[in-house]
Amino acid sequence: MAPRRAAALRGGDQSLREHLIASAERLIAQRGAGRLTVRDIAREAGVADGVLYNHFADKEELLAYALQARVQAAGRAAGEPPGQAGSRTVEANLRAYLTWALAFHAAVLPAFAGLLHQPVVLQRLAGLPQGDGPVRAAVVDYLRAEQRLGRVAAHARVDAVAALIVGVCHDLVLRHLLHPDDATPPSLPSRDVDDLIATLLHGIAPAPE
């Protein structure tokens, strides 16, 4: 006899596996992944605790898929990448990309809080299809398009520029997570943005004589 369909799914098109991932993703968005238990996820999904093991090897596998879903949801919420190649100035577009990237990482990184003591979850996540990440890929695509237009030097290491932008976002958000009582969204002062963009555009080498 086939197992009874979960009450939460009756009349819907979502599979029970997808429902479990979505339920775990909701909890991760609210509380992070660090302390979620099988019982927490089962209650959110409206199923018995043991149902999870019919669809996943263990809790860690489910959390990995839920984290992947959280990253994808944050990417959709962030909207389309700002600035088209050839529009405005490269400087203005990089500023827009930095703001966009920071909003994305502010939505995603708290979900990973508390996972340092659960390396198995991170290992399972690393084994899932990830690509370059929506921010890194978008920045690289934009800069390569500008290279084709001649507005960015052909020899410029656009992958390195994307890595620096992502790294700045990680630094800001992680510092913010160390101060949980601070309700202010992580941000860069305008002067720091100026300095960062100037460094990305001009580097640190002395001007030729």
Image (tube, rainbow, N blue to C red):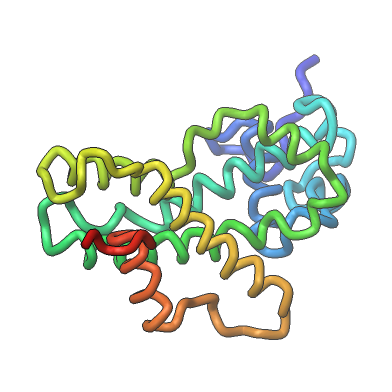
State the residue in front, 66 or 13.
66
Residue 35 point in image, percent of width and height? 85, 56
- Quadrant into which the N terminus falls: top right
- In the image, is residue 172 above or below residue 15? below
State the residue in front, 28 or 154.
154
Residue at far top of view: 1
Residue 59 point in image, percent of width and height? 83, 38
Q: Residue at x 74, y 40 (%)?
A: 122
- In the image, is residue 55 above or below residue 31? above
**Going by the image, does 183 lie left or right of 46?**
left
**Going by the image, does 143 lie left or right of 173?**
left
Q: Residue at x 18, y 42 (%)?
A: 147
Q: Residue at x 14, y 50 (%)?
A: 151
State the residue in front, 150 or 189.
150
- In the image, is residue 124 above or below residue 35? above
**Going by the image, does 69 lie left or right of 93?**
right
Residue 209: quarter of image: bottom left
- In the image, is residue 105 above or below residue 157? below
Q: Residue at x 62, y 58 (%)?
A: 109
Please state the total of marks drawn on the protein image.
0
Residue 47 point in image, percent of width and height? 80, 42
**Going by the image, does 53 lie left or right of 126?**
right
Residue 7: quarter of image: top right
Residue 177: quarter of image: bottom right
Residue at far front of view: 209
